[in-house]
Image (cartoon, rainbow, N blue to C red):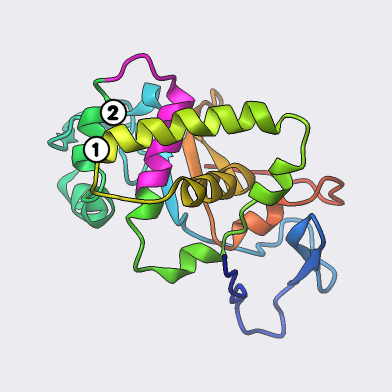
Amino acid sequence: MATPEIELPDSLQWPLRVASLPKCGRFYTAAREIEPGELVLKELPQVWVLRESQVNQVCGTCFSADLRLPVSCACGYVWYCSEPCQADDEPRHRAECGCLQRLRQRDSRCSDQLMQVRLLIRLMGRQGDTRRWSLHTGLDDFKQQEDWSDRKGRYRKITQALQEATGDALAWACESVEALLGTVECNHFTLWSDGCKRKKLGVALYENGSLFNHSCAPNVARVQRG
């Protein structure tokens, strides 16, 4: 699977550069001294989904908890705080709407599995957007780990759930689905609510931000809001 180079802002002041190591993939290193509190990257997620417990609690687009006048999609899976937020999400939600209706009928599936299936649907719905391939898949490395048989079994269940939900609408080979699952697992970030009582809202994939997530021995700490 081809992995295009990530395009970073063209600026002499850009404080990061992309490095790469075998078995570690690509990651950021500092190109200069970075001041405490300095903003080095601001980016919207490529795809995101909410946890099952948050589906009717926060807006599916802006994550606002103000749903006093909620707008629900036909599938009943996604709620919005306003019609503009619904209109903004419509191109992304169109491919998954019918699939989500079938997913919600399978109550035996755990929340994490539902999230992963929905992430796959959203990624597959971007078939015309080649930028999604810039996210590294950790599948080859996962296959070398001792727990690969357990992970493979979990991948098989997710693939089966995906096939049940999509039918022939998104016909992908099992190997391609596994590669996307490897992409999700080695690149995703947890979405958190703001405020004192923080809670997990869902997960998201960031094309550039994912490179902050690839070091087993980091020399900086990541502080995340949202």
Residue 209 rendering spot, x and y as whole percentages = 61, 57
Element type where label 1 sits in the image: helix
Considering the whole magenta stretch, tell me its main secondary structure. helix
Q: Quadrant of residue 158?
A: top left
* Three-letter residue code for mark 2: Leu
Q: Residue at x 21, y 52 (%)?
A: 90
Q: Which range of residues does the magenta coloring cover?
A: 106-121
The residue lying furthest to the top in this view is: 108
Q: Residue at x 43, y 36 (%)?
A: 159
Q: Quadrant of residue 118?
A: top left
Q: What numbered label is drawn on residue 44? A: none
Q: Residue at x 17, y 33 (%)?
A: 75
- The crowd level at tag 1 (other Cα within 10 Å; few <14, some 14-19, many 20+) is many
Q: Quadrant of residue 35?
A: bottom right
**As rendered, which of 193 and 29 lies closer to the eye?**
29
Q: Which residue is mark 2?
A: 103
**As rendered, which of 75 and 99 lies closer to the eye?**
99
* Three-letter residue code for mark 1: Cys
Q: Which residue is mark 1?
A: 99
Q: Residue at x 49, y 32 (%)?
A: 156
Residue 96 rendering spot, x and y as whole percentages = 26, 44
Q: CA distance from mark 1 to mark 2?
A: 6 Å
* Image quadrant where one finds the N terminus: bottom right
Kindly tell me whether residue 216 is visible in this rendering: yes
Query: Looking at the image, is 202 positioned above or below residue 107?
Result: below
Do labels 1 and 2 touch, CB within 8 Å?
yes
Residue 83 rendering spot, x and y as whole percentages = 15, 47
Is residue 111 highlighted in magenta? Answer: yes
Q: Is residue 118 left or right of residue 176?
A: left
